[in-house]
Amino acid sequence: MSSTNAQQASDRMAMTKDLSTDVLSVLKLAKEVTTGLGMFGIEPALNGVLAVCEMVQNMKSNKKDLPKLKEKINNFITALLLNNNNNNVPAELYKRLQNLSDALQKIAKDCTPLASKGRIRQFLQANDTKVKIEDIRQSVRDALQEFSFHGGISIQIVINDIQKRTRDTQKTGMYCLFNITNTSFHANKKDYSVKLHFLIDQLSVAPARFDAADTPSACLEGTREQLLKDLHNCALGGLGSGKQIIWIHGTPGRGKSTIAKSLAIRLHEENALAASFFFSRSHESRSNFNNVFCTIACQIAIFNQQFRNILVDILEQDDQLGHATPGIQLKKLIIDPLSKLPKIQDPWVLVFDALDECAAGTELLELLCEEIGNLPINLHIIFTSRPEHPICMWFHKDPLKSSTYVIILDDVDEGVVSKDILQYLEYNLAGDGKKAHKEPLANPEQLNLLADRAQGLFIYASTTIKHIRDQLGYPPAESIGQILKLDSGLIDDLYDHILHGLIPEGNVNLIKKYQKIMGALLHLQEPLSIPLLSKLLGYDEDVAVEAMLQRMSAVLIMPENKDDVVRIAHLSFWEYATSRGIRRVEHPKFKYRPELDLDASKHHESLLHATLSVMRAELKFNICNLESSFLANHQVENLQVLSNRYIEGHLSYSCRFWSAHLNELRTVNSISLGHDLKDFLEKRFLWWLEVISILKQVDTAALAILSIADWSKDRNDELASTALDALYPSCPMTLLESGGTLQAYISKEVISRHRPNKVVGLLFSLVLAGHAESVESVAISPDGKRVVSGSMDKTIRIWNAETGEQVVEPILGHTIGLHLLDSHQMEREDWRTSSGTNIGTYRWVTSVGFSSDGKRVVSGSMDKTIRIWNAETGEQVVEPILGHTDDVTSVGFSSDGKRVVSGSRDEDYPNLECRDWRTSSGTNIGTYRLVTSVGFSSDGKRVVSGSTIK
């Protein structure tokens, strides 16, 4: 068997072994839930599925197991057919079981020819047979994975049965709640749990909870005890009158994040931690401000059932809140649900770590300033950050100033901190088996000197420990001696010592590897594992990357498993490595070696070339082998499984983040980069769109392409034009999540046939996504800065025309929805906007519009009313204007803003007299029905109308 086939078989074996944790737990839980409830028909079907699952889990890669597998599949299919009499199985569940049955039937047919091979044929084709058996096992696994995906097995089962047994309209069945935080399943007694899980897909939720992967470690047991005790007491009620916020700040290396982690663990164990968000500049999703409030809301929903129920109701009314601005999300997803809860008796705590690593941390504080008075008094918020000037400014002015209890880590008693650092050093270096070292790596005198040298910086102590333990070819005593000879305890001096020792001057090959590998690692948008980083950088093997990272392990957090990510241990090393040139001029202690500088522009350009190279090599048409172009993504039953199988991590990274690296190169001129970008647009654009659609990143498409246009402006007119041209078909493609992935190719083909090559056409620089139903009417403000839209989802939304952000919260006032046009008799009336008084009868055109000064919006609705709103705040200006007896289909302001013209399908009003289009004569040419368009003249004295009579 070839090495490729062997690797494929190995990979399939590993995936199948994971079945017990992925699917078996779900099946067993569903069986426990349904057993004994008298739901005849459910238990045999689930038992059949469970038997197939266990068979696949235990079978070996030989043909003797194939008849047994086929028998288990047939038993399940028979049980399903026999036990669906009298509608014993709920319709929705039966449909899913039938889909599983169909998939397994096809697999069972493949078992027969393999099982019946003669001995000679078996011997000659043994390796090929083994691979095919593994393919069968994987196919069964995929089918089972899809059937039980998201724990949905028991969702319809129990609710259907218990609803039949009670007259209570509220569903009270048991459900499997998929915990988004740790991907485990829990039982819950409300269907809101399941609803929340499915609605979470509409939100931007980041893996940023205190116990998520790649969050900081906690304090060593026995250290920082008094500080943690004080913080714990403050968080649970000892803040004093009017205080709701704790701000912990300190210079780099003081241990802010480990303190936050330890505190979060304690609060979580006491059921007082409502939510947490640990920011990280190394993770795009954990530094993105737009993810913060969705993530916090979902965590609070898991923490408190009443909050969850309210949040679900809100999301069901407006499932597009995930696309709203952070300010709207804070109010709608957090403040509004909290305001509807009974008074919180015990403190709820929110923890935000490393606020300075949030891309828009000051915006968070600005919103908190605005809303602090609307938060429950028992909701306490903890922040940690560096004392950076923009952050300090917000905490030093009211209302945050009067609401905040400040802890400055640099002011904590130096003797206490040094004692904790000494304990930390002893634990790691003193031996006696404390840290897997039977023999001590440092004696007591050396430990005391190292603790003094750290000068209160835990990062200095941590880096020292790793350097002593991991330094290649040096006895620990020699490494300690070198560190103690340094002029100071500055962390940058320690980094200089480490780097100059590990990357000797004149070793050209080692320096090149340092530049390529460490330069990439420090500038990734999110951390990668060693294998994925190796593939991204074009290495055939992991050896070179792993060797370099092991060499630099003193400043890194190395993974325990190969699939875990590697990352820098502390932000201070990133700052040191990327600004060495500037710093060396100011503080020359070591010989300045420019070849060790990791210049940001240089490495973003290298990573951009790397991502484009990966996409050039691996993107292809229909990458997931989808069978139909007519299915929407959510209709492809196993799309997630296919995505994981065919879109590897380095390709996923490349497709998601190439434009982020390009955005860092605004001042970089490169002919080769222009060629690579042109090649991407002309040959791989649609294949890339397909992948980001599958990865649910469609909303980033337009901005990514615009980054090419922006970079090539004034550099390459042809490339800029190509990029802008690509945006023409991208707008329908941004709807791929509701359409099908393969429809991108169909859309492109249709557009290319009907559009001349020389015409750029409509450029979709923004896609305004937010409405839950079709958008029926839009208008742009006179100054061109805002857009108003009306929808059948009963809302009016006002948008920033430059950024696409919503300016105010969705306006929900009409009871049915906004409508634009219909082919029935239509009337429209003219109203005084100040009073709502009816002053005349005209005909109509639109359903939303701005006033000439842009300060008000008028809307008409199927609820037969006209309403006028403040465009800045979204508040209704006057009471609903009544008078129409049918749907209002068109509205508009007069130029002076004093009147509104409206159109309707009223049956009871006389038909409009329509005047000549040549307004100079004003000749009455007749009376007509079906007016389709009306508008005011600029002086407000005339109304012009359009009609279906042409």
Image (cartoon, rainbow, N blue to C red):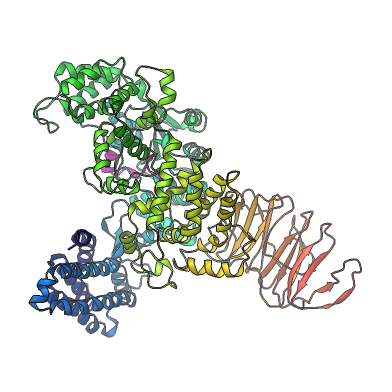
Q: Is residue 281 magenta?
A: yes
Residue drawn at the location 71% of the way across and 75% of the way down = 906
- Left or right, 787 with respect to 282, comes to right
Q: Nearer the viewer, residue 841 or 394?
A: 394
Q: Is residue 321 visible?
A: no
- Image quarter in which the N terminus is found: bottom left
Q: Nearer the viewer, residue 480 or 853?
A: 480
Residue drawn at the location 37% of the way across and 54% of the way down = 652
Q: Position of residue 643 (x, y in %)?
A: 34, 61
Q: Position of residue 895 (x, y in %)?
A: 78, 55
Q: Is residue 656 magenta?
A: no
- Image quarter in which the C terminus is found: bottom right
The range drawn in magenta is 264-284
Q: Nearer the viewer, residue 708 or 673?
A: 673
When asked about the image quadrant of residue 20, the answer is bottom left
Q: Nearer the viewer, residue 712 or 925?
A: 712
- Left or right, 854 with respect to 654, comes to right
Q: Is residue 853 visible?
A: yes
